[in-house]
Amino acid sequence: MRAQRGPVPWAAVTRGALAAGPLLLAALLAGRAPLGVVAAIAAMLAGINDRPGSRRTSVRRIGVPALAGAVGLLVGSYAGAHLGAFALTLVLTGLGLVGGGISAIGPVASGTGTQLLVTSAVGAGMPLPDPVWQTVPAFLAGAGWLLALRLLLPTPVSRIGAPRAGRGRGPYRPDSRFAPRPDKRSDPRPDPRPDPRPGPRPDPRPEPRPGPRPDVRLDFRFDGERAAVAEVYDAVAALLDAAGTEHAGARRAALTAALDHAQDALAGPRLRRHPSSAAERRLHAQYAAALPLGEAATALAWAERTVPKRAAEGPRRLAAAVRGNSLAGPLPAPARTDPALRALDAALLHAAEVFDRGRAPDLHTRRRSVAALVRTVLGAGGREYALRAGLCFGAAVATAQALHHGHWYGAHQHWYWLPATAVFLVKPDLGPLVSRVLCRAAGTVLGALLFAGFAAVLPRPEGLVVLVAVCGALVPVAARHFAAQTTVVTVLVLALVMVGGEPQASAGRIGETLLACAIVLIVGHLPVPGQRGGGVRARIDAADAAAHAYLVHVLGESDDRAARWTLRREAYRTLAEARAAIARAAAELPALARHSAGADEVAAVLERLVDTTTACAVHLDDTGRLTPRHTERLAALRDELATRRGGVGRSRTLA
């Protein structure tokens, strides 16, 4: 129920203002208002999917759901025109099963399933005077227009003043202000390894550090990638600061989130498989250089020892260098008193060399095969998604058909609102069911009342076009809370359909929304065949398998670092996805929440297992053998995991 916080996304606001409103105005000037309404609806749906991130991720995040929306519009239009009420209900219910099943794959697939169902309801329940071969291209044009704005418009970015590439202060060397002092109390034995740092001894005189010079400029090439990589280094520094404190777990989770975001930002579609420009290769190399730093920081946090403040200064300077597109400059040299600190020092050396002459290694991701995607859709999680979405969508379609043929709709004959509302309410990955129902009801009532007031005073159609443009600009800001987003979208859609020729129907929309809320609450909590909580169990199984693969690789003492970092990324990413699914399930009513009881404790054990595996990997790199503390911790985690698994998923790890 809480709203998200953050700065106003002015770039997204600008795109929203230039999307639906101008499209509708152009269609009105051309005398094709119905096609303009379709294009504006597509732009609105694309604007809802226009989330913060890089341009690469936006291609997939906006483009794939738009293609599914065109398919849904095509199917819904033909089904609504040629099928009776019973057959139409069966077809749309089957489509609901498909849309719910594919939503289990991930966030982009979830948006794809949502748009497929919404547009099928619009196509069947809002008959348009233009033929389908014109409305479907109009829909694609509307979504393509917002995607073109996303790709072509520059993004204002704030760059901190730092030496530009080619003007740095040379390769890595320890900064004398952070030179380690021998501490005989902590480790009286000298490090037996030679100092790997090349070059002359550092100048003992401190160099002046210029203050930050904010430089706001327009970035046409990188709008989210550079910031995402810099946030990874900031997260590493925050984890080092929190090592040995009660905040270490939360900071490690924040590092995982930052790595996931950066990985997604850099792994988006491009014309070539490998980075084609020097700047892009450099950015990929900087991301890869953060992985050993994160590994060393995780090992230090696992050891539950406080780290000297100078240890976090290096990652922070690297973050500033990423934002400023500069060389690393002098970095602090942490004390090399234990394996984790030596790993941190080696990772800093490697990062500095990469920043000076970076290449583009692999992003340490593995694409899921088609067979794996099919298994996800047909697995327990996919079946649960499909059954809930299909039943709720089908029940809403059946109710809307009964009201439509019983002439309960009054002056208007469009019945799409009821099933479309049910789609936005029922998706399990969009949040707890009850909170979404309450927010949707409140947002629709407020939006309908606001539109009724606007419709009474605004001139038509020019006033409604302005209202559509304003609402399009507000969608990115309103996305911080579902009730606010519902309010803005309600005003926008009511304005669009009035421009298309439908009379003002705010009271009817309120009634249909409340009816959809009741349908979703009833159908969503009905007992269904099979075991409930399949989505949570599927996420736990995936996290368990990833943790097992990572542990086997580390204990096998393989020298393949790239494979190890790939497995580590998969383990932490699947754990984060499991945590998110568990949190959503725990916020449901007891009828649904009880099916995921105990999953949170299993995820916590798996997280400690992956952290321990990371600490083992760092220690094996340094000494070639594990300490009794490592082996005892692994054995304790094995026993605790076996105890807690119970009925939550299948036990695999440490079997």
Image (cartoon, rainbow, N blue to C red):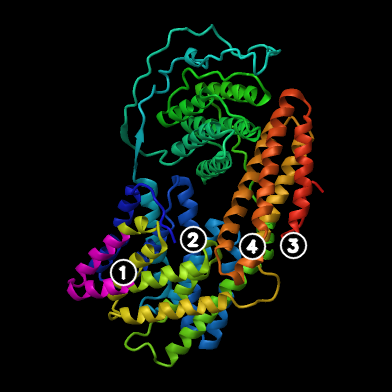
The secondary structure type at the circle numbered 2 is: helix
When asked about the image quadrant of residue 523, the answer is bottom right
Real-space Cα separation, disc 4 to disc 2, in angstroms:
22 Å
Q: In the rendered structure, which disc, 3 or 4, sits on the residue that comes first in sequence? A: 4
> What amino acid is at disc 4?
Gly
Residue at the (25%, 75%) spot, across then down: 452
Residue 333: image x %, image y %? 55, 18
Tag in front: 1 or 4: 4
The percent coordinates of residue 114 (x first, y second) are: 50, 66
Q: What residue type is labelled 2?
A: Pro
Q: Which residue is drawn at 56% across and 23% down?
A: 348
* Circle nearer the viewer, 2 or 1: 1
Amino acid at dot 1: Val
Chain-order first, disc 4 or disc 2: 2
Question: What residue is pinned by disc 1?
Answer: 491
Please name the residue that numbered disc 3 is placed on: 647
Disc 2 marks which residue? 65
Q: Could you tell which of marks 3 and 2 lies nearer the N-terminus?
A: 2
